[in-house]
Amino acid sequence: MLIQDTRAIVSGGASGLGLAVAELVVAAGGKVALFDVNDQAGVDAVRKLGPAASFHKVDVTVEKAVAAAVAAAITTMGGLNLAVSCAGVGWPKRMVGKEGTMPGDFFRKVIEINLIGTLLLCKEAAAAMQQNTPNAAGERGALVMTASVAAFDGQIGQVAYAASKGGVVGMTLPMARELASSGIRVVTIAPGLVHDADAGGPAGRSARFPRQAGAVPAASRPAGGIRATGGSDRREPDAERRDDPPRRRDPHGAALVISDYRLGSD
Ligand SMILES: NC(=O)c1ccc[n+]([C@@H]2O[C@H](COP(=O)([O-])OP(=O)(O)OC[C@H]3O[C@@H](n4cnc5c(N)ncnc54)[C@H](O)[C@@H]3O)[C@@H](O)[C@H]2O)c1
């Protein structure tokens, strides 16, 4: 699968990592549909990206809205072979804080956006991709989910966030196993702190994210994996032990591959 043939839905595509992915896809000649709740940012992003991009105001937690937006995006783009789930919130809160204990609804909302929202997009996208005619390599599409290094190394105040991202990591392998026979690859990335506009730097500066997400469709066969990337390297994740797969050093920082599942025939 070549990136110039990409017809991608990017949730959270109006900002940050999602927007950087959209920019990469469009620059390579592909098409993108941005799914986001922030319509002003979505409209601005499409104006910047040009006619290869469309914006769909959609809350990823609303099942019917996601299904309708996936159908609309397929009509607009003339197909779908990549879904990148970047919609998410990183709201911090202590479980037992000065102002009291964490409301269950707070925890629920973070799970709903970061975890359930990811599932709702992936299931609709995968169902649509299963209708694609496979290319010569047997590929019908790819799903990229965004976890976080917090899934393995959550900090104080990240009980809800880390739980949501741990859930995304947990979904990766069974999803990849389920979809491998359809020629749909599933990959989860687990970035560290990204230096984007909100973090005080130029958006897209952490260019390894879109490059890695962009590189996914170029791989040659069904696979699923979890990649932890980026610079939040205060401590190494407990998940990385001596018996884990060999680490690959990121020349830009502290990237490491937590795991890499290949579901091919060999
Ligand atoms: N920035 C980082 O350092 C970092 C590190 C690790 C993981 N991540 C993850 O990467 C993803 C993108 O983060 P970012 O830094 O680009 O954030 P961002 O805030 O720039 O972008 C997130 C986008 O998601 C949208 N969104 C939020 N709730 C939504 C909903 N219910 N439905 C649809 N859209 C919704 C927002 O409007 C926003 O445009 C998130 O899942 C985040 O948890 C970010």
Image (tube, rainbow, N blue to C red):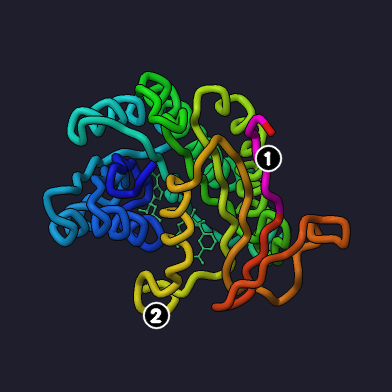
Residue 146 seen in the figure: yes
User: Which one is nearer the viewer's eye here, 136 or 181?
Assistant: 136
Residue 103 seen in the figure: no
Coordinates of residue 147 in the picture (x, y in percent): 58, 52
Q: Residue at x 45, y 27 (%)?
A: 126
Answer few, some or many: residues within 10 Å of disc 2's Cα (few below 14, many 20 plus, some between 14 and 19): few
Alpha carbons under labels 2 and 1: distance apart: 31 Å
Task: Residue lying at the far right in this picture: please name it.
Answer: 242
Q: Secondary structure at mark 2?
A: loop
Coordinates of residue 1 in the picture (x, y in percent): 39, 41
Q: Provide the residue designation for mark 2.
A: 201
Q: Provide the residue designation for mark 1.
A: 170
Q: Which residues are magenta?
A: 259-265
User: Which one is nearer the viewer's eye here, 87 or 257?
Assistant: 257
Quadrant of the picture in which ligand 1 is shown = bottom left
Coordinates of residue 196 in the picture (x, y in percent): 41, 72
